[in-house]
């Protein structure tokens, strides 16, 4: 169930956290991308925040995604939710092309890290 906490910064979450995955006995891989890495964030002057993904190390399945960012509604976690529902491996999704410059580049970076281990 995707959820957003309207704080400053806003927090968007879907799926499990790294801690929840580990507590459930899952060997997890983590991918992380700082908002400051995206040129679109630099253009917009919103460089504080990050995207973090949690994947099953064995299957590559995306288990969770977390976005902490100013104006986090622009980083809605529904896209990762759709990937999780489809059980798409992070390595497959990491190869998807994104428009440039957009903030979706961060998701590609984080998914690529999780796929690489």
Image (cartoon, grey):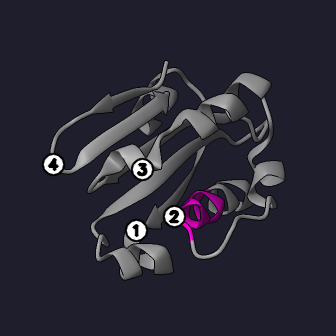
Residue span colored magenta? 102-110
Q: CA distance from mark 3 to mark 4?
A: 14 Å
Specify which label sits upstream in the sequence, 4 or 2: 4
The residue at which mark 1 appears reads as: 35
Badge number at residue 56:
none
**Dots 2 and 3: beta carbons under 8 Å?**
yes
The residue at which mark 2 appears reads as: 103
| Secondary structure type for disc 2 | loop
The answer to which image quadrant residue 56 occupies is: top right
The residue at which mark 4 appears reads as: 8
17 and 87: which is toward the camera = 87
| Secondary structure type for disc 4 | loop
Which quarter of the rendering shows the C terminus?
Answer: bottom right
Side of 26 where 60 appears, left or right: right
Give the answer, above or below, for where 79 lies relative to 1: below
Please provide percent x and percent y for residue 67. 40, 47
Please provide percent x and percent y for residue 22. 49, 31
Give the answer, above or below, for where 51 lies relative to 22: below
Q: CA distance from mark 1 to mark 3?
A: 12 Å
Crowding around mark 4 (Cα neighbors within 10 Å: few <14, some 14 to 19, many 20+) is few
Q: Is residue 104 visible?
A: yes
Comparing labels 1 and 3, the label whose residue is closer to the camera: 3
51 and 39: which is toward the camera = 39
Comparing labels 3 and 4, the label whose residue is closer to the camera: 3
The residue at which mark 3 appears reads as: 74
Residue at 30%, 70% in the rendered image: 46
């Amino acid at each position: 169930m995707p959820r957003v906490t309207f704080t400053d910064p806003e927090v968007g979450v879907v799926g499990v956290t790294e801690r929840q995955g580990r507590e459930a006995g899952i060997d997890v891989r983590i991918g992380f991308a700082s908002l400051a890495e995206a040129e679109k964030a630099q253009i917009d002057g919103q460089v504080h925040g990050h995207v973090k993904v949690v994947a099953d190390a064995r299957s590559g399945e995306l288990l969770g995604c977390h976005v902490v960012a100013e104006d986090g509604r622009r980083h809605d976690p529904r896209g990762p939710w759709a990937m999780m529902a489809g059980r798409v491996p992070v390595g497959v999704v990491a190869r998807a092309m994104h428009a440039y410059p957009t903030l979706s580049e961060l998701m590609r970076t984080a998914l690529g890290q999780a796929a690489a281990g």
